[in-house]
Image: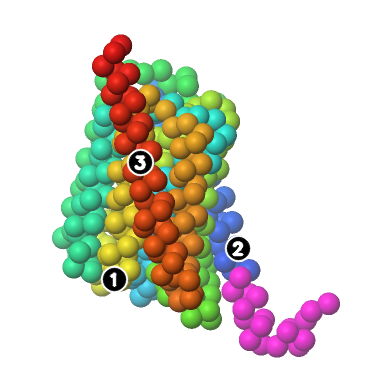
Amino acid sequence: MLTFSTLGPYQWINNMTWIMLVAGLTLLIVGAELLVKGAARLATSFGIPALVIGLTVVAFGTSAPELAVSIKAAFSGQAELAIANVVGSNIFNILFILGVAALIMPLVVSKQLIRQDVPIMIGISILALVMIQDGVIVKLEASILCIGVILYTFFLFYQGKKIGAESSNTTVEIAAPVWLNIIFIVTGLALLILGSRWLVESAVNIASSFGVSEVVIGLTIVAVGTSLPEVVTSIVATLKGERDIAIGNVVGSNIFNILAVLGISGLFSPTPLLASEQLIHIDIPVMVAVALICLPLFFMGSTLNRFEGFLFLVIYIGYVWYTVAMALSLHYLPQLQMGLLYGLGPLIGFYVGLCLFKDLLKRRYL
């Protein structure tokens, strides 16, 4: 049996760091689940449609870990981690979560998502790219993002009420009393705060011990960890046939991550949020690219089929592989870069172009 004396103080600290990382992720997931359950039940009791719940209450609730981690990182002096967490989460949400969900069951995309919410996600992704070109997000830019999330949320709730879509399609229960839902929300927020503290501290320690930058840790371990609530929510919604919530959760989370997470953390951060050269020239353009690819794929037949889900997963594996190889300066990095740039990139472009051509022919002769 290993003890403190046999491990030594350095190994003990490393083990405790990993335990804090796992514990922090666990608290984030449990806290987000309680927050989503309480908030979604309250929203449903007001007759809000399932898609609107997916785009707002569920999406915002499952993005609460990103918000908690980015705010904590900003106040702890890890300003690069705050932006890297958002960018990595948005890439993971689209490529991994939608990829897995589509493999389980082809996803039917609503017209509202195609015509309204996906273009909004693309637009604010491009806005974030423009804002970060100078390497920082200052308080004025953060204020603009905060105003954007307020306007977007009010618009969705107004639209949902006006349309009067059936709220019976939601997967949440509404039998619980109001006081219990409030307890869920408060407890969830408390767990999110504690979990984010442990996660940020352990992630920074791990990055330092391995000689890996905070940006890479934020794009991978922290981004995946804070996106686990979205994974669970979208997969469960897909299995239950609530595919509006499955896709709406991802799209809404990405919108919330940029507008609210970057906005709030940038607004209250004592210093401007920082973006490294890697974020500016590689990761944020990738985030914009994966948002852009959603529009034609969703538009064609209003579905995301299993092959496209598999393609999303391949792209994500390639992206993470390249990120890690670049961080560790692996000897085959130039070959990997050439393969992704001149192999996977043209393949994706050819597939999207072919599908658009087939869809155009189909519409022309119908």
Residue 22: image tag: 2
Q: Is residue 252 above or below residue 361?
A: below
Mark 2 and 3 residues: CB-CB less than 8 Å, in contact? no
Residue 142 percent location from the top left of the image: 22, 58
Q: Is residue 340 above or below residue 181?
A: below
Q: Of residues 47 and 180, which is closer to you in this image? A: 47
The residue at which mark 3 appears reads as: 350
Q: Is residue 363 above or below residue 107?
A: above
> What amino acid does circle 1 point to?
Glu
Q: How many marks?
A: 3
User: Is the residue marked by circle 2 packed among few (<14), some (14-19), or many (20+) residues within 10 Å?
Assistant: some
Looking at the image, the residue that sits furthest to the top is 366
The secondary structure that dominates the magenta segment is helix
How far is the residue under mark 2 from the one under mark 1? 29 Å
Point out the image quarter for the N terminus: bottom right
Residue 53 percent location from the top left of the image: 40, 32
- Whether residue 75 is in magenta: the answer is no
The residue at which mark 1 appears reads as: 277
Q: Of residues 288 and 272, which is closer to you in this image? A: 288
- Whether residue 4 is in magenta: the answer is yes
